[in-house]
Amino acid sequence: MKPERKSLPCGMIEPAAATTAASLLQPRQVFRSDTRWGRSVIEWPSLDAFLVTAEVQSGVHSVPIGEFAGKQINYDFLITARPGTVLLCHFHGNAPRDGIVLPIITGLGVTSSIATSMFVPSDPVLTLDASLTLAWHFGCEGIHLQAITVSIVKKLRTILHAPRVVAWGGSGGGFAAIRIVKDVPNAIALVWNPQTNIAKYNKSHVTRYLQTAFPTIAGNSSLPSNREQFPSLCTDEFLDSYQGRILYLQERTDGHVVAHLKPFLASFCRKAPCNITDSSNFSGFATDQLYLHLVHWGNGHVPPSKDVIAKILRLLSDVTTNLENLENLKCFPDEVIENSAVNVSQPASAKKISGEIGTDRPGSFSKNDPSLDLK
């Protein structure tokens, strides 16, 4: 005689089926390669599985986010889980590929003395072409990477109980940081010499990126744009409902002042930026959401010193510090940025100095941005 099978109330799932369904959402730990980031990788079955998890562990994670040209694309990123602390999100910029094995995980050296949670993604589009060094964390055909990254950052902020998100990076990484902070309330973007419009970067590099990641539209040289994907950060559509704040560091002899800073300020400030970028040096609030530090610390498209970045990140990792503190408490390392040889323990107050841009010859665009070695 067969045991009687009792029907479950409507909407309920049998325990065995629920257990099986739950197990399908769990990640597995795998060995990929005998490299620093390949020995132990936490592979997730899907992006949805990651976004519904109740907890994450520290380590290198790999999440499938779609297909391109019949190939599965995985999003690899490092997570350091320290619940209750600020979440630092580092976006790499130009990444020379000679002798480098993906994923590219950078920023750990400059943050080594900062005990916070971290999210460090490797741009998955670099897997499409071994010669591609920069893809702005924008994505490729069929993969809206900006929107995916926002969803991951928001998830991590929630499950790690992060009181603040700080997205940081320079050049192409700065572009990604400004974009992510748009959709994360009360987040801060720390950027230096960022691009603000992909199309305004070096033409040959943009063309190579388009041919690699968007082959069907490469001929018209126009990246797709919608409410989730923004190839330009200088549009009303992008700046509408901007939810974060930006600390923008800019070397004033960099060609990015004309091509990227000025258009961004004109859009972000809703007015002509001549009162700011016609000064030799400027340090202060351009708007209540944008703090600009425009000074001379090197020649052309060069980053600030690692000491400067590390100090600012330490300050922003303290939730009692905000952008007003950086100005009012005189803790912005002005002379260190102008001259990285100066001791970082001697901060100067933020100040505006009138003058004319052009006393130093503006830097030209570089085909290969000098990288800030943060490893």
Image (cartoon, rainbow, N blue to C red):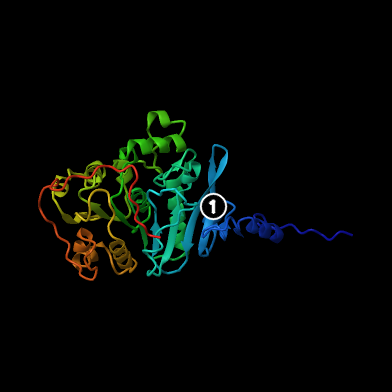
Q: Quadrant of residue 312?
A: bottom left
Residue 194 appears in the picture as rendered:
yes
Q: Among all residues in the image, which is located at the extreme right?
A: 1
> Which amino acid is tagged 1?
Val
Q: Residue at x 49, y 53 (%)?
A: 103
Which residue, given by chain and number where applicable, does mark 1 sit on? 63
Which quadrant does the C terminus fall into?
bottom left
Foreground residue among 309 and 227: 309
Indicate the position of residue 239 as horizontal and vertical percent values.
30, 46
Indicate the position of residue 210 as horizontal and vertical percent values.
42, 36
Q: Among all residues in the image, which is located at the extreme top?
A: 219
* Picture mark count: 1
Which quadrant does the N terminus fall into?
bottom right
Left of 60 or right of it: where is 293? left
Q: Among all residues in the image, which is located at the extreme front?
A: 99
Left of 25 or right of it: where is 247? left
Indicate the position of residue 145 as horizontal and vertical percent values.
45, 46
Indicate the position of residue 5 as horizontal and vertical percent values.
79, 58
Placement of 218 over or under 73, stated as above or below? above
Q: Residue at x 15, y 48 (%)?
A: 360
Few, some or many C-alpha atoms within 10 Å of disc 1 (few <14, some 14-19, many ≥20)?
A: many
Left of 84 or right of it: where is 298? left
Q: Residue at x 38, y 51 (%)?
A: 180
Foreground residue among 353 and 358: 358
Placement of 142 over or under 39, stated as above or below? above
Left of 301 or right of it: where is 80? right
Q: Residue at x 84, y 61 (%)?
A: 3
Foreground residue among 149 and 340: 340
Residue 154 appears in the picture as rendered:
no
Element at badge 1?
strand
